Amino acid sequence: MAPKSFFALFLLSVTLSYPMASDPSPLQDFCVAVNDPANALFVNGKFCKDPKLVTPEDFFKAGFNNAGNTNNRVGSNVTAFNVGNLAGLNTLGISLVRIDYAPFGQNPPHTHPRATEVLVVQEGTLYVGFVSSSIPDGNRLFTKTLNTGDVFVFPEGLIHFQFNPTHSKAVAFAALSSQNPGVITIANSVFGSKPAIDPIALSNAFQLDVNVVKNLQTKF
């Protein structure tokens, strides 16, 4: 075999084998290794049910027609169907949510660390958007006003939000590309962590008076 042909074949084999050598995507926030199996709590995902014992009920969930209670400080409610309450989703890499919005309600800025989200508006109007990472061109904001039947995509891991700018309620459904996408609501995580982040550190980070930070921490 000619040297050039051999080198090309070598590069092709390395390229094709590379994806097969990667680790599986995480399905929880962290999974600390233990040497003693007796101390293990769960694996990356769920254990599988014996196929002989599987029934149609394992793939069924009712309730997406029921509106969520939006009587809260953000004026929205998220009803999630994921592997935690729909066992048949295990290993399938997808989940679903219903989001109800009161007039002027919002789904505050948040991220899904393990999923891209595709949102479709079933009723009403929503102002939605996401912010890109700071590389290469800074934190760009991508926004759109959506009406009934419109679709918008929020890329995996990026901060995004939805806001109902009208006097009428709104309803949206979203599919996420993970059986357990996770959610990090920015304000809750920053100002409501347990234990609390040092308010002086947050004061410096957000360029706020430390008393303002302390007040925010009491709210979250």
Image: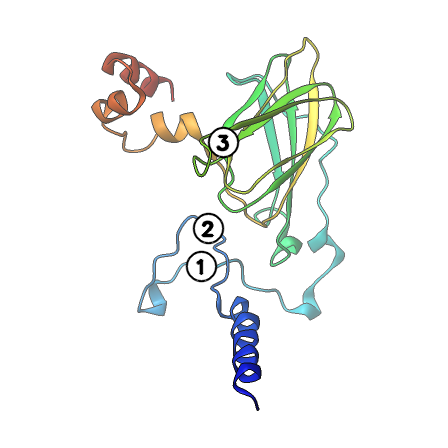
Label placed on residue 42: 1
Q: Position of residue 192 (x, y in %)?
A: 35, 27
State the separation of the CA atoms marked 1 and 2.
10 Å
State the separation of the CA atoms marked 3 and 2.
17 Å
Up the image or down, 197 lies above or below 55; here it is above
Q: Amino acid at mark 2?
A: Gln
Q: Residue at x 61, y 65 (%)?
A: 49
Q: Position of residue 109 (x, y in %)?
A: 50, 27
Label placed on residue 110: 3
Q: Which is more foreground, mark 3 or mark 1?
A: 3
Up the image or down, 35 lies above or below 110; here it is below
On screen, residue 88 versus residue 24, left or right, reads right
Q: Position of residue 179 (x, y in %)?
A: 59, 50
Confirm or deny contact between disc 3 and disc 1 (CB under 8 A).
Answer: no
Q: Residue at x 52, y 58 (%)?
A: 45
Label placed on residue 28: 2
Up the image or down, 124 lies above or below 58; here it is above
Q: Which is more foreground, mark 3 or mark 2?
A: 3
Q: Amino acid at mark 1?
A: Phe
